[in-house]
Image (cartoon, rainbow, N blue to C red):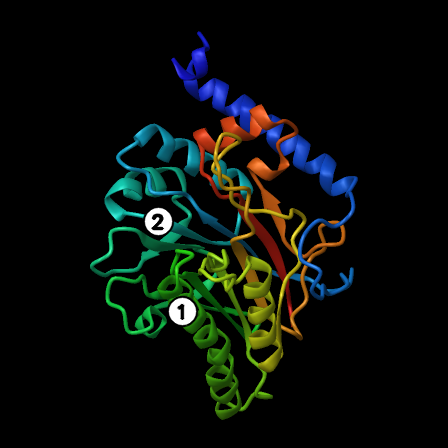
Amino acid sequence: MYGGSQRPRAEVERENLGGWLEGMAFQEENPGPQAGSALATHTEDPFVTKAFTLASWNVEHFKDDPTRVDRVVNFLKLQDPDVFGLYEVEGKEVFTVLTTKMPTYSFHITEGPETQEILVGVRNTLTSFVTQKIEFRSGTTHMRPGALLTLTIAGKNYTVLFLHVASGNDPRGMGLRDDMLVRACDFRKVLDKADKAAGGAGRANYLFVGDLNTMGMRYPFNKSIGADVELQKLAKEAKRVKMHSLSKDAPATWSNGSQSSIPPSNLDHVVAADHLAFKAFGTASVNVRGWPKEPTVAKQDKWIADFSDHGLLFLEVRRV
């Protein structure tokens, strides 16, 4: 039986997830002070309509645990996103559960020698096109490629690049990560040029999202680089191409639990073109769901064990 209960596992999970959603509804109606990034957030315009909602979530490699796969997909389904990206997945582990429980979506997964891929899901009512972008491997074949999604909504294209960049706080890891993020920012210029060639204003509706692993770098002789400095570097690169990191309503998106020697960290991000607007969650543009919103350390630890060490990022893009 699940969690020591004598009731069926599915019943317990529905109750737990239902309670979590009730708590989220309360928080959205009674937002507290912003705890995320201090970077710019667009003010919500009540007259602007939704383009699409998006969820981004590193579900942590399932390691042949079908019960956790089931819990993760149930949780994802309850968020009801129009588009989602999952990181650290294998097709054989999630195919049956996703196609059974989310039959109104189409799914696309990256391919390569690595075992932990990026999976993109798109609601079937949306016009979409997905491609694999190997240039975001930074010339390293074992790295995951990016998954590039283009949506066409009311005659406008919206481009979302899903990324899971290099981990590691050693010089090599940070170097690869920095190169990938610079490439992601520079891709804005490619898209702007394509938009202009197609008769547009040369202003692509572009954002990139994912597990960006902004953990800094350890180095001897007092030469380490903190995660805050790495985020400043990302902000500088983004500003160069008229983009910015969206603010989040939680200070950390990753935690290995209260017994870990590593503190909770801010690893997952959304970087968007300056002209795009987003629904506001309190004073933030990105709602972090999952363990960061659990009220006690014990409940956070349980959520991490049941679902993932990463929270889920949720946002709503408004029409341009």
Left or right, 130 with respect to 42, comes to left
Q: Give the residue type that dot 2 points to.
A: Glu
| Above-or-below relation of 250 to 210 | above
Residue farthest to the left, as pictured: 113
Res 236 quadrant in image? bottom right
Q: Residue at x 36, y 54 (%)?
A: 119
Asked if disc 2 and disc 1 are in contact, CB closer than 8 Å, the reply is: no
Kindly state the secondary structure of the residue where label 2 is placed: strand
**Mark 2 Cα-neighbour bin, 10 Å: few <14, some 14–19, many ≥20:** some
Would residue 97 be visible to someone looking at this image?
yes
Res 95 quadrant in image? top left
Mark 2 or 1: the one toward you: 1
Give the x, y percent position of residue 217: 46, 60
Q: Earlier in the sequence, mark 2 or mark 1?
A: 2
Question: Which numbered disc covers residue 195?
Answer: none
Q: Considering depth in this image, is 79 or 287 the residue closer to the camera? A: 287
Q: Considering depth in this image, is 183 or 68 the residue closer to the camera? A: 183
Kindly state the secondary structure of the residue where label 1 is placed: helix
Name the residue carrying label 2: 88
Q: Give the residue type that dot 1 points to.
A: Gly
Left or right, 281 with respect to 152, comes to right
> In the picture, which quadrant includes the C terminus?
bottom right
Left or right, 229 with respect to 175, comes to right
Q: CA distance from mark 2 to mark 1?
A: 21 Å
| Above-or-below relation of 44 to 257 | below
Q: Considering depth in this image, is 44 or 155 the residue closer to the camera? A: 44
Q: Considering depth in this image, is 123 or 168 the residue closer to the camera? A: 168
Name the residue carrying label 1: 175
Q: Residue at x 42, y 18 (%)?
A: 9
